Amino acid sequence: MKAPGPVAAAVRRAPRAFAVLALGAVLLTGCGATGTPVDPAPVSAAERPLPVGVQENPTTASTSAAPVPECNPTQSLRPGPLPPAGQMPAGSTMANIQARGKLIAGVDQNTYLFGFRNPSTNRLEGFDIDRVHDVAEAIFGPSPNIDEKIQYKVISSAERVNALKNGEVDIVARTFTANCQRWADINFSAIYYVAGQKLLVPTSSTVESLDQLAGKKVCAARGSTSIGRIVAKKAVPVATDTWSDCLVMLQQNQVEGVSTDDTILAGMVKQDPNTKIVGPPLSDEPYGIGIPKQNEDMVRFVNGVLEKSIGDGSWAQSAQTWVGGAQPPVRQYR
């Protein structure tokens, strides 16, 4: 076969040469060009992200559930004598917990002062956590490492009742307001603290009560009693999974305020001094320890533990540490 001539050889080499030249031109353009990016997104136009699970105008318990009989939600079962620690009565709920070796407690880890994770120690702390410690020590005996006898299950406000109904936990200590709606599904201990729903706003705000926020967005945790009162004041409820998310939304100007128990709001103020609590209390929020409906022996036992902690001063010491001192509420029994 005859060898190709110079012209034919040059034609065959041309595509590669052109490709090399084109690539060089691109590289030179990239190095020396001063053009602007295509379709730049101005930073001022970017919206701050919402926390996961945020919902406006959530369905409230009052609109989604059948009416329940009236009750006195602050009345619990009368306590009996406390058995010695480590010697729970045979066949009792407490004996089953003792045999298991762990008290399973539903708690929060995001509510500063009541149930939160200390970033320095990674341990759960707070006024509610102290109540869990009291119950565990009454079952297993006092211990400097009582957390080893507790299996904490972190749950949201909306998960509290179902966690008890489904037998996932032995108790729930999580700023848990006792009301007739919940009494229909679970039991409560005697009341160990009484809070009141108020409003949190930025320190620069001129708002003094929830009445001034009709038509405005106000945050509360999903499943809390606070949602219904926000609706009643004609504000727009915004539900989140945690109270921490509400604080973030307030800081990002995505809501006008946060409305819930003053105890929870006090923790937010300590976390962010650019916020303040305003307005009169909208309600009384009596906190009880949630217990499964069928475990009445556990209700009486926990009430005995509460009476003991109030009598020996450990309740007062805990209150001084976390809520600046308070008087224990009068226990009511039926």
Image: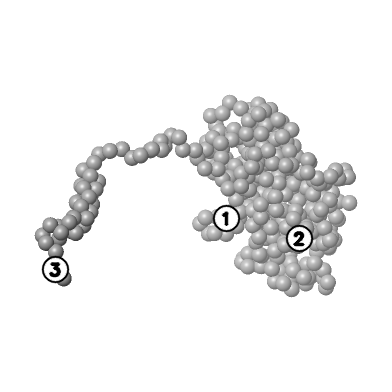
Report x, y in % for residue 230. Answer: 70, 35
The disc labelled 3 sits on which kind of residue?
Answer: Lys
Which-is-in-front pick, marks 1 and 3? 3
Q: CA distance from mark 2 to mark 3?
A: 90 Å
Along the polypeptide, which appears first: circle 2 or circle 1? 1
- The disc label shown at residue 2, or none: 3
Residue 91 horizontal/vertical position (percent) = 83, 72
Q: Is residue 144 above or below residue 286?
A: below
Residue that mark 2 sits on: 166
Residue 88 seen in the figure:
yes
Q: Give the mark nearest the N terminus, 2 or 3.
A: 3
Amino acid type at image mark 1: Arg
Three-letter amino acid code at the position of disc 2 = Asn
The residue that appears at 74% across and 55% down in the rendered structure is: 162
| Mark nearer the viewer, 2 or 1 | 2
User: Residue under circle 1?
Assistant: 117
Applied colour scheme: one colour
Dot placed on the residue nearer the N-terminal end, 1 or 3? 3
